[in-house]
Image (cartoon, rainbow, N blue to C red):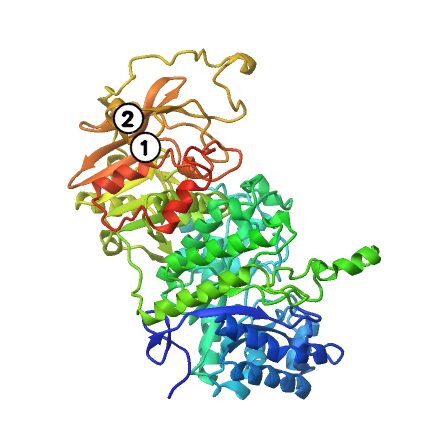
Amino acid sequence: MDNFVRVTDAGQFDLQGKRWFCNSVIYFGHEPGAMIDWFAPEVWPRNQAVLDRDFGRMADLGINHTALFLSNSMFFDRGRILQRGMDCLDTVVETAKRHDVRVTLFCGPFIDSPDEYLRVTGRAWEYGERWLPSFNPALFDAYVQQIKLFTDRYAGEPTVLGYGDRIDRFYKGFDNDTIPFNLKEEWAAWLQARYGTFDNLRDAVGGTLEGTPTDFDQVLLPQESKFNASLKNPLAYDFILMQKKEIGEAQARWDAEVLKMAPDQVMWTPFEGCTLDWAMLDGFTPERHKLHAIWMEYYHWQAVRPAPVGPFDEWAHTREFVTSRLAHESPTIYNMAYIITRYVKLSVQRPVVLCHGVRLDAPQTGAIDETQQLATIDRVNAACLAADGDGWHYWSFTDDWESSLAHAREQKMHPTEMYFQGESMGLYDYDDVPRPVVSLVCQYSQELQRRVRTHAQPKTSEVLLLSSSAQMYNLFRRMATPTAAAVNGALMRLGVEADYLWSGQNDVHINPETLAGYKLIVVADNMYGRDFRNMPDKLLAYVENGGTLYFALDQYDTFADEHGVARPSAAWRTLAGVDPAGNTDWPGADVPCRNWPFPTDKPHEPNFDFGSFTRLHWGVCPAFRHRAPVGQRMQFLGLRSTDEDFFTAIPGLVPGAEVIAVGKSPAGTLPFVYRHAVGKGTVYVNAWTNNVFRDNAYRHDYGGWEYDFILALPLETAAVDDIDLTRGPALWLRNTWGYFGG
């Protein structure tokens, strides 16, 4: 019987006609650990001695797969194959096979230095600084050669599930400088192919560009621009689009080449998922069906950090969100895992497996002790399955030799000895004692087996959470992604597990047929007013045909495209429901706000709870008072944006519009939340920001649910049936910090 795990047309793993989940750990022995040579003669005997025990434990826990982290130095020497390394790997594979544990061979590091290129190929490097295989065929061939060593040996072995690629990334480090070369020529060629003439480019960005270039080769790269890749750079979208497409194409070519050599095995493409402190988002969303299987790196602490990191130059353009709370305390951690899994699953239509772990004794990454590790892994696993993910890789099986936690006794005796923080996140500690999380691993193993037995069907939803690609293809994602996660949290608290998409996937824009498949569309952006030019028309048609739409309003009279160029849009004005000459008969409209002699000295203004930021005081209108748990809050709501932090002043509304809540501003009482009918459907508008849902230790509504009525009403209007308030995520998120942010 065929015993290979395969990828189905529906984008799932299959084993002998049944769905297969990847229940996996990372493994690299105890010594010396990580991607150093754990096959080296001085450490291999100790690592070999525990192989049978370790793989036996994996089987006992229900683990069915491990990713073996390997290094080029184990197998290559100036192009020659090191037989000793292959013999060691054979031993590992044979041990895994005895215990019915499959393996993926993940070999690194990047081939991004002359020494590493010489090690793998046996050839001297002669290409200058051209270290991107997207643009260098010789380097691409080296990556194929790197993996051919293993396919030649294991292509017919089902125990070897597949191979992980390390093929491309524009940014090799965690900053905005370590690009292998400056990409100036490639950038110019990309822009010329995309726009044809320089006049077309200039028109697309509104007529001017920084530095007043006159031809494509003079256009600044984002790292040369004073605006970097922020929203203020009209070409930020294009540069990140270039990365996504070029990297995706290179990875797809690598998949195709390796599949020729190993047609029965799986090719993993690692995506850097929640990496909000990276300079750019690399290769996250290539077009669907081009790749084979997605290994989604999920760094949970990057969703909301306990403390800022850096500093990096681009922080001046887009802030990093921080919280005083640890990872296990943050609802954003769960919600971020859900939305990235759901997004990639829907977009790529291939298996998506989260790789995640919790480093201990590292408060900057959000965890200190073992119980916090357990709680975070629990919630991320639950989010992955709720999003119909295909499993996980726990990082990692044991703490390695490098870990400072592995040498606590030695450090006390010899304080001058220095140990790296290392991979102190194992399911087992360095002394081979299981951590509390192991009991949870066993429970999730049973859950996966149950889903296989019951033939769990692919997930569907009646609600779409939608983000603007224009907001996500630049550094603003540092605000937009946590906001999307927080809005997802509000939906979860209301019992809804939504689908999540962006308005475009590279050059493939979302189509009306996709939108029409949902009863309710919730736009996740902080404020919605920047997207592809035709998105308002698509959304208007969706509402006119009976759909329900919710968004947080930016400007009601103009809509900006992906370059940030504001243009008139009749569809947008209709969706906004604003008529300067229209109805102003909402509660409190003719009554000035009391105690608001604005502006005044901050110390004497009793309503200035946070004087350095714009804030909104609000109240629920009488007709809707019974729908909101908190009728009025004299408080600061979340930041609307990084600058121009203004409440959208609504001068009047179209006939029939209903004001649900009002915001109290210096100008008086203005609509905060309102709804109006368009055709057969209904539009709900929030005139402040979606950040009211966001989790932040410095916000009164952290983890609370007092604003959820804003989304509960559209759910009711849309007659959404796929709601369950009793589901675990709904209960957990409603009660995380008490019912009113206590």
Q: Is residue 202 visible?
A: no
Amino acid on which the number 1 mark rests in the picture: Tyr
Relative to the observer, which residue lies in front, 337 or 170?
337
Relative side of 160 to 470, left or right: right
Amino acid on which the number 2 mark rests in the picture: Arg
Q: Nearer the viewer, mark 2 or mark 1?
A: 2
Q: Residue at x 39, y 70 (%)?
A: 449
Q: Relative to 321, does residue 289 appear above or below in the rendering?
A: below
- The image position of residue 447, as x and y in percent, is 40, 65
Relative side of 197 to 108, left or right: left
Relative to the observer, which residue lies in front, 630 or 351?
630
Residue for badge 2: 625
Please tell me how many numbered marks the rendered image carries.
2
Q: Earlier in the sequence, mark 2 or mark 1?
A: 1
Relative to the observer, which residue lies in front, 589 or 711?
711
The quarter of the image holding the N terminus is bottom left
Quote the CA–CA distance across marks 2 and 1: 27 Å
Answer few, some or many: residues within 10 Å of disc 1's Cα (few below 14, many 20 plus, some between 14 and 19): many
Q: Relative to 47, does residue 408 appear above or below in the rendering?
A: above
Secondary structure, mark 1, is loop
Q: Which mark is residue 153?
A: none
- The image position of residue 640, as x and y in percent, is 45, 33
Relative to the observer, which residue lies in front, 272 or 705?
705
Q: Residue at x 67, y 80 (%)?
A: 49
Secondary structure, mark 2, is helix
- The image position of residue 567, as x and y in percent, is 34, 39
Query: Which quadrant of the figure has residue 324?
Result: top right
Looking at this view, name the residue that lies furthest to the left. 680
- The image position of residue 724, as x and y in percent, is 29, 49
Residue for badge 1: 556
Relative side of 77 to 134, left or right: right
Q: Residue at x 79, y 60 (%)?
A: 410
